[in-house]
Image (spheres, helix red, strand yellow):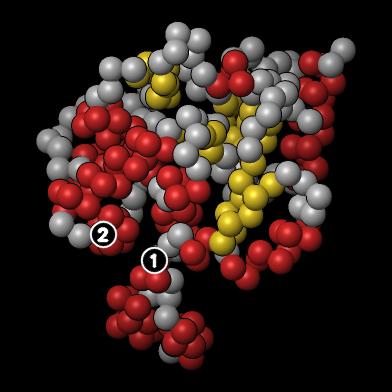
């Protein structure tokens, strides 16, 4: 509907959801991969953890080493497995809270100079969470502390599979163990910031261009929601999507109507 190009579409879902997605996407040009085939078993809770959670929740802390990692961590490991799935020049990553709102094509997502891009955002006021994620990424990569006035959270997130492969190889080399184990032991991670810090501060490729403008508008909290929906309907020419947090108690229909109005504007 919005994309005017010829991309290869890939969806990665948990094993128990594969049949559902196949039935929904039947006939669509989408490849479906099983999440569990890409993520090490250590990230999944042992069968008895759920039982303990139900019958003795106050004792759950005793079994932390068997509890795996939450879904938002697992999906980060999936993304870092991109080289196992694709070897194309460029991958555009979409999280589930991304909604396209205007037509676009490949030219919107790449620099015409022939260089590869890395979107680095430099907000006027950086959040403590993003600062901590950038700081943690440097720690994982065995880098000295540095500037945390920026981050790499931007959608669609443009990654290059060969650079992702270099990142996971580097993690294994400096820590002396499998890269998924490294990130499991790290606890809280941010895949986008880890990749960004690695590319900019470790890999430092000559064919890199830092792009400071993202492709998205974000509705992160009540303030950003009000700012987006209280002003005249308009999306900047360099923005092709909205990123919408799911914890604002705003109905899906409200967002749907807004996106439909944007679509009408761009098709008048």
Residue on which the image places disc 2: 178
Dot 1 corresponds to which residue?
Answer: 40
Q: Secondary structure at mark 2?
A: loop
Question: Dot 1 surroundings within 10 Å: few (below 14), some, or many (20 or more)?
Answer: some
- Classify 140 as above or below 236: below
Q: Residues within 10 Å of mark 2 (few under 14, many from 20)?
A: some
Q: Is residue 118 above or below residue 99?
A: above
Picture quadrant of residue 136: top left
Of 204 and 66, the residue lying toward us = 204
> Marks 2 and 1, how far apart in space?
10 Å
Percent x, y of residue 217: 58, 26
Q: Is residue 51 above or below residue 88?
A: below
Q: Residue furthest top?
A: 113
Residue at position x 64%, y 41% in the image: 9
Give the label on residue 163, or none.
none
Instruction: Tell me where residue 229 appears, x and y as whole percent.
Output: 70, 27
Task: Say which quadrant the C terminus sits in.
Answer: top right
Q: Residue at x 16, y 54 (%)?
A: 175
Of all residues, the one furthest to the left in this rendering is 144
Residue 177 visible to an observer of this rendering: yes
Count of marks, rendered view: 2
Q: Quadrant of the N terminus?
A: top right
Residue 186 seen:
no
Estimate the x, y position of residue 80 in percent, counting from the top left. 40, 48
Contact flag, marks 2 and 1 (Cβ < 8 Å)? yes
Secondary structure found at label 1: loop
């Amino acid at each position: 509907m919005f994309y005017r190009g010829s991309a290869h579409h890939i969806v990665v879902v948990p094993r128990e959801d594969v049949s559902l997605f196949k039935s929904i996407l039947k006939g669509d040009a989408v490849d479906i991969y099983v999440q569990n085939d890409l993520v090490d078993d250590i990230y999944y809770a042992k069968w008895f953890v759920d039982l303990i959670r139900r019958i003795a929740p106050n004792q759950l802390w005793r079994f932390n080493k068997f509890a795996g990692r939450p879904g938002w961590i697992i999906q980060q490991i999936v993304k870092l497995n991109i080289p196992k799935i694709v070897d194309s020049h460029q991958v555009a990553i979409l999280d589930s809270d991304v909604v396209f709102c205007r037509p676009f094509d490949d030219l919107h997502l790449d620099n015409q100079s022939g260089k590869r891009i890395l979107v680095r955002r430099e907000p006027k006021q950086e959040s403590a969470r993003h600062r901590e994620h950038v700081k943690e990424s440097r720690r994982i990569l065995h880098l000295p502390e540095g500037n945390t006035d920026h981050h790499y959270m931007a959608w669609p997130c443009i990654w290059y599979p060969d650079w992702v492969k270099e990142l996971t190889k580097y993690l294994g080399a400096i820590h002396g163990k499998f890269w998924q184990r490294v990130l499991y032991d790290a606890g809280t991670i941010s895949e986008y910031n880890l990749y960004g810090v690695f590319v900019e501060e470790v890999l430092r490729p000559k064919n890199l261009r830092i792009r400071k403008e993202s492709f998205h508008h974000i509705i992160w909290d009540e303030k950003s929601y009000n700012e987006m929906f209280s002003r005249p309907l308009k999306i900047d020419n360099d923005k092709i999507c909205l990123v919408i947090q799911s914890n604002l108690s705003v109905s899906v229909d409200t967002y749907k109507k807004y996106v439909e109005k944007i679509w009408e504007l761009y098709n008048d």
